[in-house]
Image (cartoon, rainbow, N blue to C red):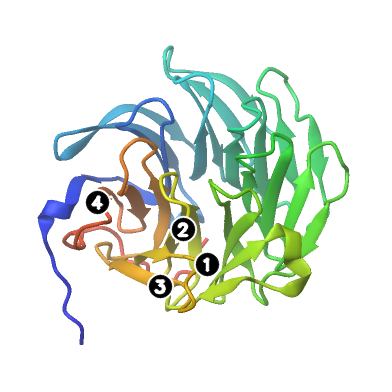
Amino acid sequence: PRKKSRSLSTMIARSQLEFMGYSVAWSPFNSGRISVSTSQHFGIVGNGKQIIMDMKSKSLSKVHVEEMADGCFDSAWSQTSENHLVYVCGDGSVTLLDLASKKRVRTYKEHTAEVYSVDWSGANKRYIVTGAWDNLVKVWNPERTQCVRTFSEHKNCIYSTVWSPHEPELFASTSGDCTLKLWDMNDKKAIQTIPAHKYEILTMDWNKYDKHIIATGSVDKTIKIWDRRALDKGELCMLEGHDFAVRRIKWSPHKPDILASASYDMSLRIWDVNRDQKSGPQKFNEFDHHTEFVLGVDFNNYMENIVATCSWDETVTVFDVSKPPPAKAKGGSSSGSQKPK
């Protein structure tokens, strides 16, 4: 079997969480600030905590904790105010938080099932998009008391909703119905629908440098790279290597061909998806420092190669992906035979 380095020099910070980690999001304003969404008991029952942390030395210190009666599954930072954050929960709620006052500015309760995804647009900087297990996608303006639009084409639960970083009214969604849909928020129907995988699609992301390039990740263990201009011709390439479902993918904000993927196989993988190489995409680093499903990953917006991950092992870790993997986390929960949620 292949031996892996266990150098601690690659790890910048690690913190033990009380609950299982579901999502991480770096602040677009503060290079050391991170939001972590967590939930008890595999997200099935129990409480949740939305945690804001600051990275200091080798530790992550808590700035604020939102305690919820249901699991917290995702969060997104405002692109105009460093103190505003939106997070979503298993009770169907969408909450806007002001960190300056540490108060909830607004809580929406229009979804009727778990809200699993949220994104705040970086292109229009005004709108929020959410996806839930009620099969609905909703767009919100934080200045209004109700959602501004609901999209209902998906036939199964929504796992991922992400705004295009290039076009202010364009976003995408992925679902348990095995489709990727592209939407203009001013149209009632999706402008493109792609049966991108044969199994549930848990995640997607837009390339930060090329507005036409999209990546999707699925229960089928694969990641596919797509060109919006030629979707009918199939994927540009397929990345294989994960042993279980791909839970979350993120394109690097620093390099156009670097992609990170977090999986239920307890690993994070970094891919160099260079479309100009005849040899095809190459995985150039693999990290297995978590001891349970890895559900969250995000690239730091200011520091190249710095990534944060969170896991069901109840840890959040910040490390340098250009160096050998950090040591495995200690403690944490055991997933047993529970079905991932």
Check contact, mark 1 vs mark 3: CB within 8 A: no
Which class describes the residues within 10 Å of circle 4: few (<14), some (14-19), or many (20+)? some
Residue depicted at 43% across the width and 68% down the height: 264
Q: Which mark is residue 283?
A: none
Give the mark, 4 or 3, whose residue is nearer the N terminus.
3
The CA distance from mark 2 to mark 1 is: 8 Å
The CA distance from mark 2 to mark 3 is: 10 Å
Q: Which residue is mark 1?
A: 275
Q: Nearer the viewer, mark 1 or mark 3?
A: 1
Q: Taking 307 as reference, is 215 left or right?
A: right
Residue positioned most to the right: 188
Give the mark, 2 or 4, whose residue is nearer the N terminus.
2
Q: Taking 214 as reference, is 299 left or right?
A: left
Instruction: Indicate the amino acid at tag 4.
Output: Asp
Q: Secondary structure at mark 2?
A: loop
Q: Nearer the viewer, mark 2 or mark 4?
A: 2
Q: Position of residue 254 (x, y in %)?
A: 41, 45
Q: Position of residue 221 (x, y in %)?
A: 51, 75
Q: Taking 187 as reference, is 312 left or right?
A: left
Depth check: 283 or 309 in front? 283
Instruction: Indicate the amino acid at tag 1.
Output: Arg
Q: Which residue is mark 2?
A: 257
Residue positioned most to the bottom: 1
Q: Which residue is mark 4?
A: 320
Q: Secondary structure at mark 1?
A: loop
